[in-house]
Image (cartoon, grey):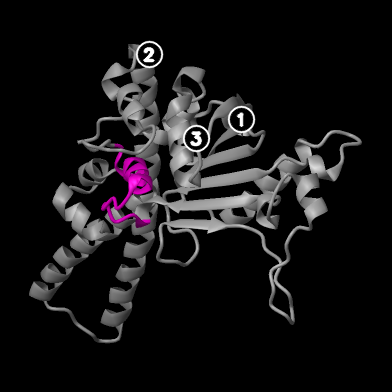
Amino acid sequence: MRNTIRFDWAIKRLLRNKANFGILEGFLSELLGADIKIESILESESNKQSIDNKMNRVDLLVRDSKGELIIIEVQSNYTHDYLARILFGVSKLVVDNMDKGMEYSMIKKVISVNIVYFDLGHGNDYIYHGTTNFIGLYQKDVLSLSTHEQIVFQAEQIPQVYPEYYIIKVNKFDDVAKNTLDEWIDFLKNEEVREGTKAKGLMEAKEKLDILKLSKEEMAEYESDLDAWRDYASSMSTSFLSGKLEGEEKGIKIGEEKGIKIGEGNKENYAEERVKQEKIEMAKKCKQKGMAIADIAELTGLTEDEVREIVS
């Protein structure tokens, strides 16, 4: 049973409040493996409020106590060029934070954290980390900073100078938390804080993101956003299935025109099987869109256990 509000909605509404910095600090500390302290939340393009916020990326720009810039993005629906959008977001941030006449050594380190609810790229893991290294073409050695460059950049290695990327593929998580970072991924996927969690910030999330603690106005806005998301997911699934059924019906018609007859009993079995497959396909699509198990069950008419079996 979900007991907290969705993380992407919390980013848009609640986590910008300094009183709630501990939640983000906990998440970032677990992900980056360091004690992160947030100095400020900066403005970003996703601060705008619109009905399609639920379906589009949610940007949160953070400056930590070391002056490093951290982008947090949540993306619910599949975007074919999302990897390029990650690159653009980091590049634009680097340029936007350069003052006229500023030395290049003063460029701020940027960390891009991307939480996606679809299968981005091809890979079996659910957390990916990218850094920049330079490898010798012939000697195969790793280029390192000289002593002077370490002083200039206040860094020991080149990856500490260049942007850093994290991609969290939430739907790939197998619901088995092996460590405190996994406890956070479990929360992002299932919107629930398990008893006995030891992850930094999660107990504070359980306390401050409790659905029951929303004001009437916040609850109305939250429900409105959820309804908009369900309508979007339903329309996408309906569109997908309509195209699929149209293709199947054309196939049957062509087969019959060629003299391939389907018996009434077989037609009945075929129809039942087709309905079943429709629900399975819809459940998979809805999960890729980031919908919760309970919402998928309600939309498809399947039980929650059936949905879990399908999307696991």
Q: Which residue is mark 2?
A: 217
Is residue 180 placed above or below 208 in the rendered structure? Answer: below
Locate the C terminus by quadrant. Answer: bottom left
Q: Amino acid at mark 3?
A: Asp
What residue is at 47 percent from the left and 67 percent from the top?
122
Q: Amino acid at mark 2?
A: Glu
Q: Amino acid at mark 1?
A: Ser
In front: label 3 or label 1: 1
Q: Nearer the viewer, residue 22 or 50?
A: 22
The answer to whether 67 appears left or right of 20 in the picture is: right
Is residue 273 placed above or below 22 in the rendered structure? Answer: below
Task: Where is residue 228? Give x, y as percent.
Answer: 39, 33
* Disc 2 packing (10 Å; few <14; some 14–19; many ≥20): few
Q: Which residue is mark 1?
A: 65
The Cα atoms of the two marked residues, 2 and 1, are separated by: 34 Å
Q: Which residue is mark 3?
A: 52
Task: Where is residue 136? Give x, y as percent.
Answer: 73, 75
For marks 3 and 2, the one nearer the N-term is 3
Is residue 122 placed above or below 61 in the rendered structure? Answer: below
The Cα atoms of the two marked residues, 3 and 1, are separated by: 33 Å
Magenta span includes 188: yes
What residue is at 29 percent from the left and 60 percent from the top?
281
| Magenta stretch prevailing secondary structure | helix
Secondary structure of the residue carrying tag 2 is: helix
Secondary structure of the residue carrying tag 1 is: loop
Q: Magenta residues, as a range?
A: 172-191
What residue is at 53 percent from the left and 41 percent from the top?
73
Task: Where is residue 252? Give x, y as percent.
Answer: 28, 75
The answer to whether 176 appears left or right of 188 in the picture is: left
In front: label 2 or label 1: 1
